[in-house]
């Protein structure tokens, strides 16, 4: 069994002949097109985090003293960094649907690298706030990261692929807590630079890394499983604006027209919830999410998707889970420094890094478990119950931290590790549900849900901003109440997800469409 698992990681994956998506994730095979897409998805998001969250590790002491910053200035810069990301995530979703996630990904990385390189020019609090706003553009990489992996990996592993890419990418928030203090210390000790200059020079490192990764993504990867985004199509089907799905000029002769399935030119009968086809001697389910491809949405369609109950439910859930993570990442080093004065700047950064680095395990765990539950139950309700459980657990840990405000290092680090496990797993579980919502407008859904995470981060950062007396304790307590209130009751909101809006989008029979999309 272990041998088979390792083979899946290194060998070229089996491909669904209907939509050309991979049925496994070749994590250790960057030579394979699918493996290369996966590799650059998580790496691109990780290096974006490397710059986006590169300021908090040095703000605790060095930058604060050099620029004469108050705690209010630092809090304001944290909020502004999340605001920029919110705006970029909102627009990057529709851009992904129109131009493809790869080009959007590359564009965000290159644009965000410019203010990163200009960090050394900052001389005041206002300059820092302005700079962090533009560096916050890099946080928008999350949306093309998720749209790209969703477009390359099939339904049975898409939750795992999304969770791994996002989890390993988000771990960049932990990596930067190690990298930036280490680079700064090296410049001071080994190169003889004064702290005033060393922190400024240190930001050249993330700039170079971002540019190299962006160029690799541009020249070594493809937009979709079929090549260029402009030539994308599912190998057997193509969608038309008249509400029909027409055959495309591809090797496999499969098509869906309204409520009937056609195979090799012959009408096979009515389309139902368990359509199967023989292709090359193998049987494949042709569920609706496998027989659609992403289309460029109109403004009216965009509004319809954004305002749908399915999308809004996930917006509320993700704003709490990822919002909590973003806000806590911004101030965790300062919180440790306040509660444990014996720790220096580098040590506080290293302990704060643990919170972000747990994404390597915890966020993928949420997506992998969600996929496993779905394979066993064949029901998205099971995914929603799993997500709700994770949300309630995260809220419980946040409440514990807020009430206790621990002074023991072991208790503090243990509680934050437990909270990170549940919160980050909830993030992964959320994006295992996203591909089920609107397959033809996955970029819009990913963008609005991703932006909601930043909106939540802004709300929680504002709470921290006005709780300076205990810095994080009161803020985390209120955060825990919100997390339990939204995520704990989220399953009730999710009850509207199967209300027919998804089915009516693509089939005349809304009830049948819901069955095909798995919302029953």
Image (tube, rainbow, N blue to C red):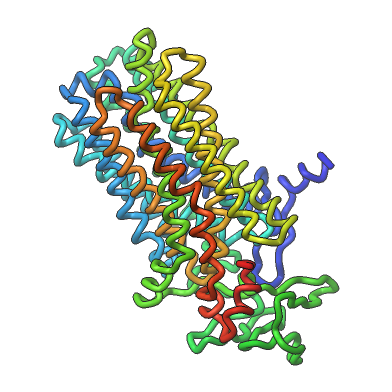
- Vertical side of 454 occupied by 62: above or below: above
Q: In this view, which residue lies farthest toward the top?
A: 342
Q: Identify the residue at horizontal 76%, vertical 42% (top origin).
A: 6
Residue 406 position, x and y percent, is: 43, 18
Q: Quadrant of the C terminus?
A: bottom right
Relative to the observer, which residue lies in front, 176 or 220? 176
Using residue 106 as the reference point, say whether residue 504 is left or right of it: right
Q: Identify the residue at horizontal 27%, vertical 18% (top origin).
A: 61
Using residue 293 as the reference point, say whether residue 104 is left or right of it: left
Residue 460 position, x and y percent, is: 33, 39
Q: Identify the residue at horizontal 43%, vertical 74% (top origin).
A: 296
Q: Identify the residue at horizontal 29%, vertical 27% (top origin).
A: 201
- Vertical side of 30 occupied by 152: above or below: below
Residue 30 position, x and y percent, is: 62, 47
Relative to the observer, which residue lies in front, 485 or 304? 485
- Vertical side of 216 occupied by 229: above or below: below
Using residue 284 as the reference point, say whether residue 61 is left or right of it: left
The reply to whether residue 179 is visible in this rendering is no
Q: Quadrant of residue 279?
A: bottom right
The reply to whether residue 171 is visible in this rendering is yes
Q: Quadrant of the N terminus?
A: top right
Q: How many labels sit on residues?
A: 0
Using residue 389 as the reference point, say whether residue 209 is left or right of it: left
- Vertical side of 257 occupied by 236: above or below: above
């Amino acid at each position: 069994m272990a041998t088979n698992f390792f083979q899946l990681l290194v060998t070229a994956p089996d491909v669904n002949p209907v939509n050309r998506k991979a049925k496994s994730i070749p994590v250790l095979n960057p030579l394979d097109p699918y493996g290369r897409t996966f590799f650059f998805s998580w790496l691109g998001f990780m290096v974006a985090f490397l710059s986006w969250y590169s300021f908090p590790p040095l703000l605790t002491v060095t930058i604060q003293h050099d620029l004469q910053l108050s705690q209010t200035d630092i809090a304001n810069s944290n909020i502004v960094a999340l605001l920029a990301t919110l705006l970029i995530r909102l627009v990057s979703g529709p851009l992904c649907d129109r131009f493809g996630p790869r080009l959007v990904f590359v564009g965000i990385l290159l644009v965000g690298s410019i203010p990163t390189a200009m960090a050394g020019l900052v001389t005041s609090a206002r300059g820092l706030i302005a700079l962090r706003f533009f560096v916050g553009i890099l946080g928008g990489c999350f949306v093309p990261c998720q749209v790209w992996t969703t477009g390359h990996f099939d339904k049975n592993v898409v939750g795992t692929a999304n969770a791994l890419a996002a989890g390993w990418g988000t771990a960049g928030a932990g990596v930067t807590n190690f990298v930036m203090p280490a680079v700064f210390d090296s410049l001071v000790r080994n190169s003889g630079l004064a702290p005033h200059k060393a922190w400024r020079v240190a930001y050249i490192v993330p700039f170079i890394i971002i540019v190299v990764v962006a160029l690799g993504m541009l020249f070594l990867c493809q937009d979709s499983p079929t090549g260029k985004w402009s030539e994308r199509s599912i190998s057997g089907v193509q969608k038309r604006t008249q509400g029909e799905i027409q055959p495309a000029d591809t090797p496999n002769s499969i098509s869906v027209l309204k409520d009937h399935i056609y195979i090799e030119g012959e009408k096979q009968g009515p389309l139902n919830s368990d359509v199967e086809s023989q292709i090359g001697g193998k049987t494949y389910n042709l569920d609706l999410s496998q027989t659609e491809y992403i289309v460029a949405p109109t403004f009216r369609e965009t509004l319809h998707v954004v305002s749908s109950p399915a999308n809004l439910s996930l917006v509320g859930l993700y704003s709490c889970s990822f919002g909590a993570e973003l806000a806590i990442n911004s101030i965790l080093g300062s919180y440790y420094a306040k509660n444990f004065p014996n720790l220096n700047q580098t040590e506080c950064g290293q302990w704060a890094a643990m919170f972000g680095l747990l994404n390597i395990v915890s966020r993928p765990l949420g997506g992998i478990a969600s996929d496993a539950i779905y394979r066993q139950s064949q029901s998205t309700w099971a995914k929603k119950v799993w997500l709700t459980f994770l949300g309630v657990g995260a809220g419980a840990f946040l409440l514990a931290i807020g009430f206790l405000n621990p002074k023991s290092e072991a208790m503090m680090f243990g509680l934050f590790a437990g909270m990170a496990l549940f919160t980050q797993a909830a993030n992964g579980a959320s994006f295992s549900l996203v591909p089920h919502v609107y397959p033809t407008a996955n970029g819009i859904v990913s963008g609005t849900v991703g932006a909601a995470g930043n909106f939540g981060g802004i709300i929680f950062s504002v709470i921290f901003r006005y709780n300076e007396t205990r810095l994080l304790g009161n803020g985390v307590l209120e955060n825990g109440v919100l997390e339990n209130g939204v995520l704990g009751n989220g399953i009730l909101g999710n009850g509207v997800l199967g209300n027919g809006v998804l089915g009516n989008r693509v089939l005349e029979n809304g009830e049948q469409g819901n069955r095909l999309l798995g919302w029953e």
